[in-house]
Image (cartoon, rainbow, N blue to C red):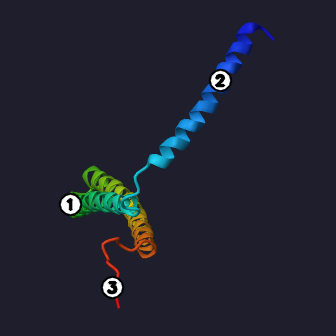
Amino acid sequence: MTAAHRLASVVASAALTFGAFGVAAYADDAPSTDTCAQQQAKVDKATEALARVTAVFARQQERVEAKQEAVAEAEDGQEKAAAKQALKAAKAATSETKVTKRAQQMRLAKATERLTTCQAENPPATEAPTAS
């Protein structure tokens, strides 16, 4: 083994050793004021995402309705065929968004469930014990 390899191995092992101490020291300093704050943040984020997906779904529903009207008003031939193709594409986009919306609803339900569990396990610290 050359001197360069030995020096590299010493530097690497020192970095790993001191890096582990740094992580352990940081973990002890982590504030734990509200144990459910992270879960609440996830619920808020999921709620906002569901609102965005719902808005997209509503816009796509409007597009489908407009395309259906266009098909009904179209003359026979190429115009009607083009309108039907546009309707088919709009329905496909709506279908994909519907699946995304359902998935987001499930994410929100799961996040809410985790928050409820966290709150049940860690009651608020503001309650004062009563003396009897």
Q: Amino acid at mark 2?
A: Ala
Residue 39 in the image: x percent, y percent?
A: 40, 62
Q: Which one is in front, 71 or 12?
A: 12
Residue assigned mark 2: 12
In the displayed structure, would residue 17 be above or below residue 73? Answer: above
**What's the amino acid at mark 3?**
Thr
Count up the numbered dots: 3
State the image coordinates of residue 2 (x, y, percent, origin top left): 77, 8
Q: Of circles 3 and 1, which is in front? A: 3
Q: Position of residue 76 (x, y in %)?
A: 25, 57
Residue 91 appears in view: no
Q: Nearer the viewer, mark 2 or mark 3?
A: 3
Q: Residue furthest top?
A: 3
- How many residues crowd around disc 2 within 10 Å: few (fewer than 14), some, or many (20 or more)? few
Looking at the picture, tell me which residue is in the foreground, 100 or 16: 16
Near mark 3 (Cα within 10 A), the count class, few <14, some 14-19 or many ≥20, is few
Tell me which numbered mark, 3 or 1, is placed earlier along the sequence: 1
Image mark for residue 130: 3
Q: Look at 30% across and 72% down and name the residue there.
A: 126
Q: Quadrant of residue 104?
A: bottom left
Is residue 121 something that shows in the picture?
Answer: yes
Sequence-wise, the earlier of marks 2 and 3 is 2
Secondary element under disc 2, as helix, strand or loop, is: helix
Image mark for residue 66? 1
Q: Is residue 51 left or right of residue 30?
A: left
Q: Nearer the viewer, mark 2 or mark 1?
A: 2
| Residue at image coords 55%, 43% | 24
* Alpha carbon separation for disc pair 2 and 1: 65 Å
Local packing at callout 1 (Cα closer than 10 Å; few below 14, some 14-19, many 20+) is: some
> Do callouts 2 and 3 mark residues in contact (Cβ within 8 Å)?
no
Mark 3–mark 1 CB contact (< 8 Å): no
